[in-house]
Each structure stands twice: as C-alpha cells, then as structure tokens.
Amino acid sequence: MDLEIELRVDGSEHRLTVDTRTTLLDALREQLGNTSPKKGCDHGQCGACTLLLDGRRILGCLALAVAHQGADIVTAAGLTNGELHPLQQSFIAHDAFQCGYCTPGQIVSAAGMLQEAGEGWPSAASKDLGATDVVLDDEEIAERMSGNLCRCAAYANIVPAIAEVAHR
C-alpha cells in the first residue's frame, strides 16, 4: 500500500509517495536522491544512516517514512549554511575520517550528541546522573558515539575532533 507524505529535509519541503514499508533512509536516498546518509548494515547497528529527526538522533534504516509525516529531517548535508559546520571543519582538521563512508553519520550523531549533552542528558558513562552540566571528556564522548561504527578505525581522531567542538 502506498501513502503520500510530506517531509522537510535539510530545509526543503518534499511530497512523496512511499510504500508503507519504506524506511526513511530509502525514501531519502532512492526517492529524493539525498545520498548524505549511507546505507551500511541496514539493521541499525552501524550508525551510517544517522539523521536528526525533529532535532533528535535516529537511525534512518529503522524508521518507517510514513511514521514521520511532516517531520523535520537534517542530514550531514543539511548541517551547512554555505560554510562547513564546525564539526565538519574539526573532522577535516583532525583527519577524523579515512574512507569517509561513516563520516556523515558520525557528524550528524555528534551534532545530536552535543545538543543532548547541552540539555543535560546523562549517558551510561555519566558519573553523576543528576548533574545538569555534562562534562564531555573522552570517555563520555566515546560512550555517546558508541552507536556509530567506523570500519577504518578513525576513532583516535574522531573523539578529539568532537571534543574540540564541544569545548569551544
């Protein structure tokens, strides 16, 4: 069964007809031509398809497009406003990507993670779950980014790239 939905992707409104089983990732890539989110494992285990949905991190391969009628979606391409996002600049400066396949998901996840930490959300690594100020040390950043895998093992550069932006 097909349904017509509306999505706002990277600031642009889109009307599309999707099969009710279509994932958000497939709708973005196949119908809208947005190749910023990547299809890695297609099982929610790698994070290459990380998106911001109404400001929160989600895995596009696990989200049905029809469930997000009218949603505001941001991909790595949508983080820019004519200039690179500070996270994108920092990933480049720290050589925090190798093949680059996971990089869009890593950057989107990092943007969402910084927002969550800024709002005081604790993680499994948080020493004080009641603290209103989250200290983003390397352990905390690594825990919060643990759902985003890098097959090239650029982690040694990814954490410092995120930390640089977090500590600005």
Image (tube, grey):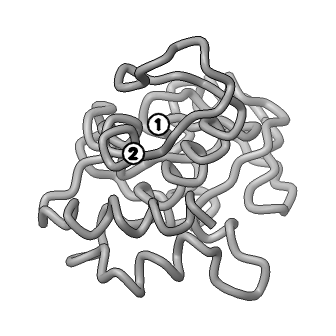
Relative height, residue 140 to residue 89 (above, below)? above
Q: Amino acid at mark 1?
A: Leu
Q: Nearer the viewer, mark 1 or mark 2?
A: 2
Rendered location of residue 31, percent (x, y): 60, 56
Q: Where the C terminus falls, by quadrant?
A: bottom right
Q: Is residue 140 left or right of residue 33?
A: left
Taking the image as shown, residue 25 lies to the left or right of residue 146, namely: right
Which residue occupies 41% across, 84% down? 92
Residue named by callout 2: 141
Q: Position of residue 32 (x, y in %)?
A: 64, 61
The N terminus sits in image quarter: top right
**SS state under label 1:** strand
Residue type for callout 2? Ile
Disc 2: CA contacts within 10 A as few (<14), some (14-19) or many (>=20): many
Q: Quadrant of residue 93 in the image?
A: bottom left
Q: Is residue 96 above or below residue 47?
A: below
State which tag comes first along the sequence, 1 or 2. 1
Nearer to the camera, 136 or 9: 136
**Measured from the top left, where is residue 20 in percent x and y?**
59, 24
Determine the secondary structure under disc 2: helix
Q: Give me the residue at 71% from left, 32% from top.
A: 119
Query: In the picture shown, does residue 18 fall above or below 150?
Result: above
Neighbour tally class for label 1: few under 14, some 14-19, many 20 plus, Cα within 10 Å: many
Closest to the observer, 143 or 47: 143
Task: Report the front residue among 167 and 106.
Answer: 167
Q: Which mark is residue 59?
A: 1
Q: Are marks 1 and 2 in contact (CB under 8 Å)?
A: no
Residue 11 quadrant: bottom right
In the picture, residue 147 is in which quadrant?
top left
What is the distance, in whole Å, between disc 1 and disc 2 at their CAs? 18 Å
